[in-house]
Image: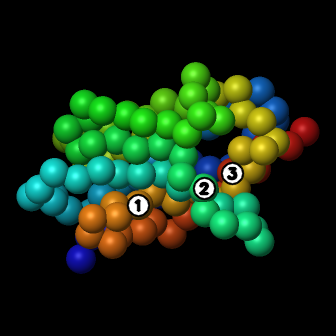
Amino acid sequence: EVQLVESGGGLVQPGGSLRLSCAVSEFIDTSYWIDWVRQVPGQGLEWVSAIDNGATGTYYTESVKGRFTMSGDNAKNTVYLQMSSLKPEDTAVYYCVIFSVGAWGQGTQVIVSS
């Protein structure tokens, strides 16, 4: 069973930066995408970004374009979400997900507040 472990969340002031990490527990012998989604308590899930496992393609929701960058390190089986120019509306629990195998991380809290 593939497991995803996120880290890197925390409290940051508006305009600040954070880098989230998502470690994949095992090699997956097929092409797949890793997504980041986020959820504000009491609200639905919002898709944020995605990267393919070859790290050749990335996609972002409009609200984070130019501020968030997703990347991957295949040697470490880890993907990253570099978040810059953070805004209070980025506050949420962030999850990494591999939808094709039904794997979800435990979530990491990001709070953007002064």
Q: Which residue is at 16% across, 51% downward?
A: 31
Q: Are marks 2 and 3 in contact (CB under 8 Å)?
A: no
Q: Which residue is at 50% across, 37% downward?
A: 60
Asked whether, in this view, residue 91 is left or right of residue 84, the answer is right
Q: Which mark is residue 106?
A: none
Q: Quadrant of residue 56?
A: top left
> What amino acid type should be assigned to the residue bearing mark 3?
Val
Q: Secondary structure at mark 2?
A: strand
Res 83 visible: no
Closest to the camera, between mark 2 and mark 3, is 2
Q: Quadrant of residue 3?
A: bottom left
Q: Which residue is mark 2?
A: 46
Closest to the camera, between mark 1 and mark 2, is 2
N-terminal-most mark, 1 or 2: 2
In the rendered image, which quarter contains the C terminus?
Answer: top right
Q: Which residue is at 54% across, 46% downward?
A: 48
Q: Which mark is residue 97?
A: 1
Q: Is residue 59 above or below residue 36?
A: above
Residue 113: percent from left, percent from top:
85, 43
Q: Which residue is at 33% across, 72% downward?
A: 102
N-terminal-most mark, 2 or 3: 2
Q: Are marks 1 and 2 in contact (CB under 8 Å)?
A: no
Residue 25: percent from left, percent from top:
27, 63
Q: Which residue is mark 3?
A: 110
Residue 42: percent from left, percent from top:
77, 71
Give the Cα separation between the discs numbered 2 and 3: 14 Å
Asked whether, in this view, residue 36 is left or right of residue 26, the answer is right
